[in-house]
Amino acid sequence: MWVHPHHRGKGVGHELVMRGVEWVREHKDSKWTDEKEKVVILLVHDDNARGRALYAKAGFEDIVQMPMDNGERWMFLRLADRRRVH
């Protein structure tokens, strides 16, 4: 995801993340019976501090089991965790 510099700091990125996660929740496979085990995974560059902060604020966490040596990090959000995505 990328937000034009003119629109940064205005909540656009957070709104896009929030709506994306809600879209996943609304369009999930009907075979899902246990939402607590379902996650959304994303990849963000280590040098993208604003992006990492945005995703962390939305509830995404680093996947520590997958260290990356190429300047990228994987982050995940449990779909059952609605506390921070609002």
Image: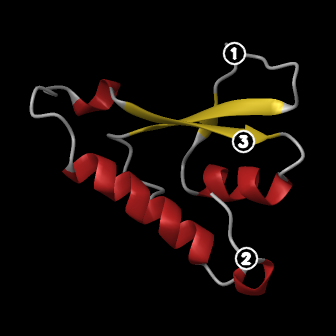
Q: Name the spot of residue 27 as percent of width and height, x first.
A: 21, 48
Q: Is residue 86 visible?
A: no
Q: Is residue 7 left or right of residue 42?
A: right
Residue visible at 48% across and 56% down in the picture: 84
Residue type at tag 3? Val
Quadrant of the rendered structure where residue 35 is? top left
Which disc number belongs to residue 4?
Answer: 2
Disc 3 crowd rating (10 Å Cα; few below 14, some 14-19, many 20+) is some
Label 3 sits on residue: 44
Q: Name the spot of residue 85 as percent of width and height, x first.
A: 45, 58
Q: Relative to the observer, which residue lies in front, 82 or 63?
A: 63
Residue type at tag 2? His
Going from N to C along the chain, the mark reached first, 1 or 2, is 2
Residue visible at 57% across and 43% down in the picture: 60
Label 1 sits on residue: 66
Alpha carbons under labels 1 and 3: distance apart: 13 Å
Q: Quadrant of the C terminus?
A: bottom left
**Element at label 3:** strand
Q: Are marks 3 and 2 in contact (CB under 8 Å)?
A: no
Alpha carbons under labels 3 and 2: distance apart: 17 Å
